[in-house]
Image (cartoon, rainbow, N blue to C red):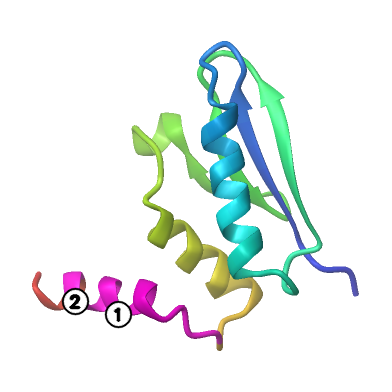
């Protein structure tokens, strides 16, 4: 079984390459053995989408912005390594959900 592929499609017209590369670096650092590939996919027209094995995790047009890094990491973790503790990322998410 091959490890999952994460794609980050970004708008070249909007110059979002650095943002896409930062997200890629962060997920590769967090999930070095759980992901087989993180691909940066150039696009146009304001696109910024993050897909895991073809499933859209985030769409800038649908969610009206960019994902918080902690949220993205939790979404990836829930699909590729559900038993993994994300440390401070998980604790920060619990604190915000407990206060609501």
Q: In the image, is residue 86 part of the stretch drawn in magenta? A: yes
The quarter of the rendered structure image containing the N terminus is bottom right
Residue at the extreme right: 1
Q: Is residue 57 above or below residue 20?
A: below
Percent from the top left, x then y, of residue 44?
62, 15
Q: Nearer the viewer, residue 59 or 36?
A: 36
> How far separated are the C-alphas under marks 1 and 2?
6 Å
Magenta region, residue range: 84-96
Give the SS element for disc 1.
helix
Which numbered circle lies on residue 95? 2
- Residue in front for this viewpoint, 31 or 67: 31
Is residue 44 part of the magenta span, yes or no? no
- Label 2 neighbour load within 10 Å: few <14, some 14-19, many 20+: few
Residue 26, quarter of picture: bottom right
- Please tell me which residue is depicted at 62% across the width and 17% down the height of the picture: 12
Q: Note whether 5 is above or below 88 in the view shown.
A: above
Q: Are marks 1 and 2 in contact (CB under 8 Å)?
A: yes
Q: Secondary structure at mark 2?
A: helix
| Majority secondary structure in the magenta region | helix
- Please provide percent x and percent y for residue 16: 53, 25
Disc 1 designates what residue?
91
Image quadrant assignment for residue 66: top left
């Amino acid at each position: 079984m091959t490890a999952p592929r994460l794609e980050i499609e970004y708008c070249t017209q909007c110059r979002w390459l650095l943002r896409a590369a930062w997200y890629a670096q962060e997920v590769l650092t967090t999930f070095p053995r759980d992901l087989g590939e993180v691909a940066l996919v150039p696009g146009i027209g304001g696109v910024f989408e993050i897909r895991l094995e073809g499933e859209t995790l985030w769409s800038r047009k649908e969610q009206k912005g960019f994902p918080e890094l902690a949220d993205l990491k939790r979404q990836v973790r829930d699909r590729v390594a559900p038993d993994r503790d994300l440390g401070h990322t998980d604790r920060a998410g619990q604190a915000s959900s407990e206060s609501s």
